[in-house]
Image (cartoon, helix red, strand yellow):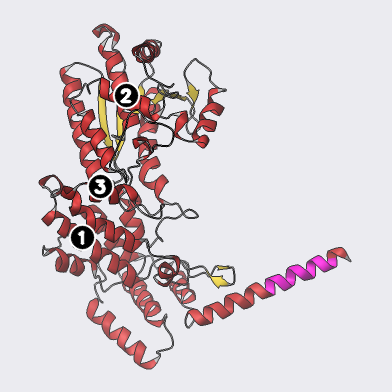
Amino acid sequence: MANLTRDDIREVIETIKGLYLEDMIPWICGYSGGKDSTAVVQLVWMALSELPADKLKKTVHVISTDTLVESPVVAIWATESLRKMKERAKAAELPIIPHRLTPTTTNTFWVNLIGRGYPYPRRDFRWCTDRLKIDASNRFIKEVLDAESEAILVLGSRKAESATRKAVMEGYEKKRYRENLSPNGSFPNSYVFTPIENWQNDNVWQFLMQYENPWGHSNKDLLAMYSGASADGECPLVIDTSTPSCGNSRFGCWVCTMVAEDKSMAAMIQNDEEKSWMLPMLDFRNYIAGDWETDRRRRDFRRRDGHLTWYNDRLVHGPYTQETREDFLRRLLQVEKLVHEIGPDSIKEVPLITMEELKLIRQIWLDEFHEFEDNLPKIYEEETGKPYQDGSIGKNKYFGAAEAKILKEVCDDMYGEEELLPQMLKALLDVEAKAAAISNKRNVINNLEKEIKKAFYKNEEEAQEIASARADRLTEAMEENDREFVE
């Protein structure tokens, strides 16, 4: 579609009206606050506004997923848009209900990175998307399906986004059981409607600039936000094929490590001095996303269960060490404090990490890593200047920071080469101390044995020798089997 006309827009609106009136299946519109989802929700709003009140019998849910690590500018934008949408829809008596979805606390970015020590997301370990985005929306869709049996997802997906997206959409298009409705591969009894599937980037901007946002959130400000996230600071609507389109600007999580560098945040800072307060966040993101060898040194040479993984003649390192996890938390709190000091009023009440996340991180450190020195409250108080208040977590009543310090000093003095000894003894003491408070001690011996096995190795060098020898034996055995098979 080279140029969007009023007839094109009218055709989409009539399609939406017709599909809405066909049945009583509720709609779920995906809304990120970006241009495509804004255009779709705006088109649905315009279509419903043309229908008589007695025909508006089914609900249109508008869901927006906040990963809690969204770019603050975009997160504030989307939150304010949802607030206005709720008010205007109620005033206009439209059955449009906005919902702000968030991941469960156990699935958030900081709980997994700082709490469990997951290495930062990368192509071969992309743990973030499902936990932060997909799970939250899927839970909502499942709730609607449980209540209504069926649902129609209204999405801003377009074939022009990429060759891969086009191939996927065309594949589902061939399986359509009704006009305009494709099957949803994730949930049975749910269908996908993509009203702007054939629009180009510039068609979207043409529409948004020509038609005022019906819930009062400025489309021109949205255009300016996209422009600010483009390296050249421009966002042309009529372009030739050699001109980069504003549609290529991508907003995402400010901590995203799936890209080599966060160009959108860097461009925002470069193009707008008022957004320079985000620079500490960009620096922290770059600190987390260290090069491969730097990140490898930050991590334990064992998996969380103590097992070794051998690949390409070296150990595959596991979770971040205690030192690294505490360093990440301290730096994050420093960045949050600085951003709240130098940022605009709108950001001052937006936490970079929530108290619920801090509580769960603390619990994981105490229960799963047996770090009974319990450093999180101290780190929080030192960096924020505020008291840490959480009486819900049961600590080890026998041991604390003083005992952990003595234990480390004794181990280093007497058995300095046994690098894992302090960890093992802390774990054994913690397991035994917590078992003293329960009557059923059936699993205590098993738990003690697990902790001893985790610390089987003196240090990484010895572990590497053991893993290498094991790999050699396995290779020899496989070669021997191959020879026997040939003979």
Horizontally, is 290 left or right of 71 in the view?
A: right
Q: CA distance from mark 2 to mark 3?
A: 23 Å
Quadrant location of the C terminus in the rendered image: bottom right
**Gap in Å between the C-alphas at discs 3 and 1?**
18 Å
- Residue 335 image label: 1
Task: Mark 3 and mark 1 in contact? Answer it, CB < 8 Å.
Answer: no
Looking at this view, is 58 or 435 the one in front? 58
> First in sequence: mark 2 or mark 3?
2
Q: Specify start and end residues of the magenta stretch as a single range.
A: 473-484
Q: Disc 3 marks which amino acid?
A: Met
Q: In the drawing, what numbered circle is on residue 268?
A: 3
In percent of width and height, residue 96 lies at 26, 22
From the viewer's perspective, is residue 417 above or below residue 433?
below
Q: Residue at x 51, y 31 (%)?
A: 166
347, above or below 364, in the image? above
Q: Read off the residue under disc 2.
A: 206
The residue located at (23%, 50%) in the rendering is 269
User: Measuring 55% from the left and 68% from the top, which residue is drawn there?
Assistant: 309
Crowding near the residue tagged with mark 2, few <14, some 14–19, many ≥20 C-alpha atoms within 10 Å = some
Q: Name the element at disc 3.
A: helix
Q: CA distance from mark 1 to mark 2?
A: 39 Å
Q: Which mark sits nearer the N-terminus, 3 or 1? A: 3
